DNA sequence: TAGATTGTTAATCGATTAACAATC
DNA sequence: TAGATTGTTAATCGATTAACAATC
């Protein structure tokens, strides 16, 4: 449908726009200009207009943007007007935390299955779902239309599990394992490497202390 | 100490170099060229050499890079040869998961205190630490030298808590709350917005399905 | 020495910002 | 209409890639 390719830098900014617009909407704000939004968000008005215009003209000269309309448009662009079915692979601490994360559900990301290799966890209840053994992955995926897998297994099993998920037709993986997955083209991967984030903080702390700040 | 400012794009790549070099080292690989590493990591050799040379010449013409040496140099640049003391604010599912995350400890990120507002959680044990009431934050921070705070509270309290942490002299915040913190310059913030990651995946799934792939 | 590969400069590419004509 | 603000083109800036001389 879209013609020109949108850069991932732009895509990465969309959720933040969506969040700010949602808050403005909740506050009853009806219209906003790129200039006002730029002050609020700490980015340039130019960038805001450029970003939005990648997807078409949502504003009106002399007026600005209608908050509610823009909010829904960006939600639509992000595919948030459709539900997404998730599975969580790995029911350890992190997997359990994510299964209980209500924010996901609010945005239409619904956890439909939780898997683990650990026999001690299998059978336990987690937010109304029974943790299944990973052996049942393939049959489960055949019965259910699952879009996204959240991968919270230790790094040793992660690559192989990702392959299995790709074979099952999963479209995207949110990867918390500390390895690079190597999935077929067309399977989207988003890495959340928490120790990388800590390392970046560590670097920036030291840089700030030894350097000249900011 | 360093003269020219290093771009955050470069900094963001350092943990990944560090990871690959660590693996190579564990495999007993002694030397590697930027060319070989570029194949392994799927980036250009040019970028690798440019990145490393931001911090000085770690290689040798005609030879390449000594894996063990480079591994330690990058670790040093990232500040991983020093210990970092953490507190976790918010002992819910996610906070507990992170407190139990052994990978952090392995890299010298040591959880020293866990706090929550919830009286039901206060007093419970978490990985050898007693969960404290958030009221005790200031006095605790006075007694301990804490570098980094991991913020896993609901978004409503996050901004105020971040202010308190900054006042206590925390140098960096790993923020899981779904808001933008507004901390004084010099306090480093790294955001982990999990729903943003899911939204990006959602966008890319739809783009791939409706578009021309990749 | 000859071969390999770095360190570094120059060229290219892409993303951000500025400017302004179009228009509500 | 006059004022405001978008949509969009042009200019700038920064990051990535290519090229190659330096050198181990």
Image: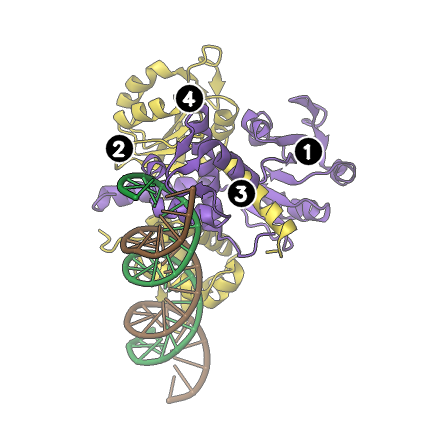
Chain colours: A yellow, B purple, C green, D brown
Q: CA distance from mark 3 to mark 4?
A: 24 Å
Q: CA distance from mark 1 to mark 3?
A: 24 Å
Q: Nearer the viewer, residue A76 or A190?
A: A190
Q: Position of residue B146 (x, y in %)?
A: 69, 38
Q: Earlier in the sequence, mark 3 or mark 4?
A: 4
Q: Nearer the viewer, residue B31 or B11?
A: B31
Tag shown at residue A184: 2
- Mark 1 and mark 3 on one chain: no
Q: Chain of mark 1?
A: B
Q: Earlier in the sequence, mark 4 or mark 2?
A: 4
Residue holding disc 1: B115
Residue A13 placement, left or right of B184: left
Does the residue at mark 3 contact the one at mark 2 (Cβ under 8 Å)? no
Tag shown at residue A200: 3
User: For numbered disc 3, what is the local secondary structure?
Assistant: helix
Q: Chain of mark 2?
A: A
User: For numbered disc 2, what is the local secondary structure?
Assistant: loop
Visible residue check, residue B176:
no
Does the residue at mark 1 contact the one at mark 2 (Cβ under 8 Å)? no
Residue holding disc 4: A156
């Amino acid at each position: 449908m879209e013609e020109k390719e949108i850069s991932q830098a732009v895509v990465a900014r969309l959720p933040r726009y969506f969040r700010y617009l949602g808050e403005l909407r909740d506050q009853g704000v009806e219209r906003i200009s790129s200039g006002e939004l730029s002050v609020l968000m700490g980015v340039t008005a130019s960038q805001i207009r450029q970003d939005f215009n990648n997807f078409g003209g949502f504003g009106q000269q002399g007026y600005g943007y209608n908050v509610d309309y823009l909010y829904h448009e960006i939600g639509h662009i992000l595919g948030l007007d459709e539900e997404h079915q998730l599975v969580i692979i790995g029911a350890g601490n992190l997997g359990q935390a994510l299964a209980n994360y209500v924010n996901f559900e609010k945005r239409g990301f619904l956890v439909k299955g939780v898997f683990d290799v650990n026999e001690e966890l299998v059978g336990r209840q987690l937010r109304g779902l029974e943790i299944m053994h990973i052996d049942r992955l393939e049959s489960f995926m055949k019965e259910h239309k699952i879009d996204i897998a959240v991968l919270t297994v230790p790094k040793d099993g992660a690559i192989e599990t990702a392959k299995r998920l790709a074979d099952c037709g999963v479209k995207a993986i949110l990867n918390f394992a500390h390895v690079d997955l190597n999935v077929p083209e067309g399977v989207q991967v988003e890495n959340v490497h928490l120790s990388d984030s800590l390392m970046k903080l560590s670097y920036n702390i030291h840089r700030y202390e030894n350097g000249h700040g900011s």
